[in-house]
Image: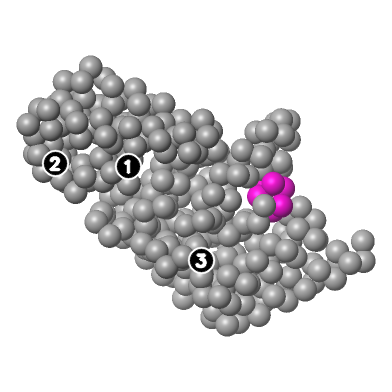
C-alpha cells in the first residue's frame, strides 16, 4: 500500500472512531478510561496523529461494540512492508518523539543514512531479494529521515562507535558520501554526534544498538535491536537503566568537536581511496 493510501485509511480509522464514539454518547475521556489510555490519546487517534496498538483497537471494538472493524483496520495498516515487523512500532514512535538519543555500534543509524548507504546495507542483509523489495526498504528509510527536517523535528543525539567510521559499507565512495552527510548534519546542528573511540576500552566493546525516545505526552521508551530482532522497553525501571548505560557511553565518547574532526578525517580517507580506484 502506498504511503498516501495508508495515511488516508488511518484518517478513515480516526473519522470512523469519532463517529462511532459520538453515536455511543461517549466522550474521549470516557473511552480512554475504558480502554486504558488517556482521552488525549483518543483525540490523537481520531485526528490520525497517533496510531493505536492492536490491543487498544481490540478494546475499542469491545467498548463500542463495532464487530472488530478497528482491529481489522489496525491489522491491515500496521503490516507496513517498508519495515521489519519488529521495528514497525519503533518507527512509528520515532515520528512522535520530541527527543531521540541513539547508540550505533556498527552501522550509521537509519535516520542518518544516505540512499546509497541504505541500499548497500539492505542488499547485504537480503542478497537474493528482488529490486522492488530493496527499493521499498530504502524508500522507507529515506522517509523516516524526514522527521529531522524543519523546526518541529526531535532533538537528536547520536553516539557512534568508531566501527561505524571504519567499516567500508558499499565501498569507499559510498562511505565518503555517507560520512560527509553525517558531518554536514552535525555542522548544521540538526544532530549532535559523538564517537566512542577504540581507545575507550571496555566501553568500545559494547554491542547492540540502543535508542531512547522521549515524548510530550507519554513516558519515555527504549528500543534495543540485535540480529533480526528488536525490543521496545517501556518499564520505567528498565528505561532508567538504559538511560544510565547511554550516559556512560556519552561520558566515554569524544567531545562533539573532536568527534566531528574524526568523522571528517575518515570521510577524507575514503574519498582519497575512491579517487585512486
Where residue 112 sits in the image (x, y, percent)? 58, 60
Provide the secondary structure element on which disc 2 rests.
helix
Disc 1, disc 3: CB below 8 Å?
no
* Quadrant of the image containing the C terminus: bottom right
Say few, some or many: other residues with alpha carbon within 10 Å of mark 2 (under 14 / 14 to 19 / 20 or more). Answer: many
Where residue 87 sits in the image (x, y, percent)? 47, 42
Dot label at residue 28: 2
Q: Bounds of the magenta span?
A: 116-121
Where residue 104 sits in the image (x, y, percent)? 55, 59
Residue 165 seen in the current view: no
- Magenta part mainly helix, strand or loop? helix
Residue depicted at 50% across the width and 63% down the height: 149
Residue depicted at 26% across the width and 34% down the height: 15
Mark 1–mark 3 Cα distance, whole angstroms, equals 29 Å
Dot label at residue 48: 1
Which of the 4 image quadrants contains residue 109? bottom right
Mark 2–mark 3 Cα distance, whole angstroms, equals 37 Å
Taking the image as shown, residue 58 lies to the left or right of residue 98, namely left
Mark 2–mark 1 Cα distance, whole angstroms, equals 14 Å
Mark positioned earlier in the residue sequence (2 or 3): 2
Which of discs 1 and 3 lies nearer the camera? The answer is 1
Taking the image as shown, residue 110 lies to the left or right of residue 135, namely left
Taking the image as shown, residue 82 lies to the left or right of residue 277, namely left
Mark positioned earlier in the residue sequence (2 or 1): 2
Residue sitting at the far top: 67
Residue 267 seen in the current view: yes
* Residue annotated with mark 3: 158
Amino acid at each position: 500500500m502506498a504511503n498516501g493510501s495508508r495515511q488516508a485509511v488511518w484518517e478513515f480509522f480516526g473519522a470512523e472512531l469519532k463517529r462511532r464514539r459520538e453515536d455511543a454518547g461517549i466522550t474521549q475521556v470516557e473511552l480512554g478510561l475504558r480502554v486504558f489510555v488517556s482521552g488525549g490519546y483518543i483525540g490523537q487517534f481520531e485526528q490520525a496523529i497517533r496510531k493505536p496498538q492492536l490491543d487498544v483497537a481490540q478494546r475499542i471494538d469491545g467498548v463500542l461494540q463495532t464487530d472488530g472493524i478497528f482491529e481489522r483496520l489496525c491489522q491491515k495498516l500496521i503490516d507496513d512492508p517498508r519495515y521489519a515487523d519488529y521495528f514497525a512500532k519503533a518507527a512509528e514512535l520515532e515520528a512522535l518523539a520530541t527527543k531521540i538519543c541513539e547508540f550505533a555500534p556498527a552501522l550509521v543509524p537509519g535516520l542518518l543514512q544516505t540512499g546509497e548507504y541504505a541500499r548497500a546495507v539492505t542488499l547485504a542483509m537480503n542478497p537474493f531479494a528482488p529490486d522492488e523489495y530493496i527499493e521499498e526498504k530504502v524508500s522507507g528509510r529515506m522517509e523516516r529521515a524526514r522527521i529531522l527536517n524543519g523546526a518541529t523535528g526531535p532533538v537528536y543525539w547520536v553516539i557512534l562507535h568508531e566501527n561505524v567510521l571504519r567499516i567500508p559499507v558499499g565501498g569507499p565512495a559510498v562511505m565518503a558520501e555517507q560520512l560527509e552527510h553525517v558531518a554536514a548534519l552535525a555542522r548544521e546542528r540538526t544532530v549532535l554526534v559523538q564517537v566512542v573511540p577504540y581507545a575507550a576500552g571496555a566501553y568500545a566493546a559494547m554491542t547492540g544498538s540502543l535508542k531512547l525516545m522521549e515524548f510530550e505526552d507519554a513516558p519515555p521508551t527504549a528500543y534495543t535491536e540485535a540480529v533480526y530482532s528488536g525490543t521496545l522497553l517501556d518499564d520505567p525501571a528498565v528505561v532508567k537503566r538504559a538511560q544510565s548505560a547511554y550516559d556512560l557511553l556519552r561520558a566515554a565518547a569524544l567531545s562533539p568537536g573532536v568527534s566531528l574532526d574524526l568523522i571528517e578525517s575518515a570521510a577524507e580517507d575514503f574519498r582519497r581511496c575512491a579517487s585512486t580506484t
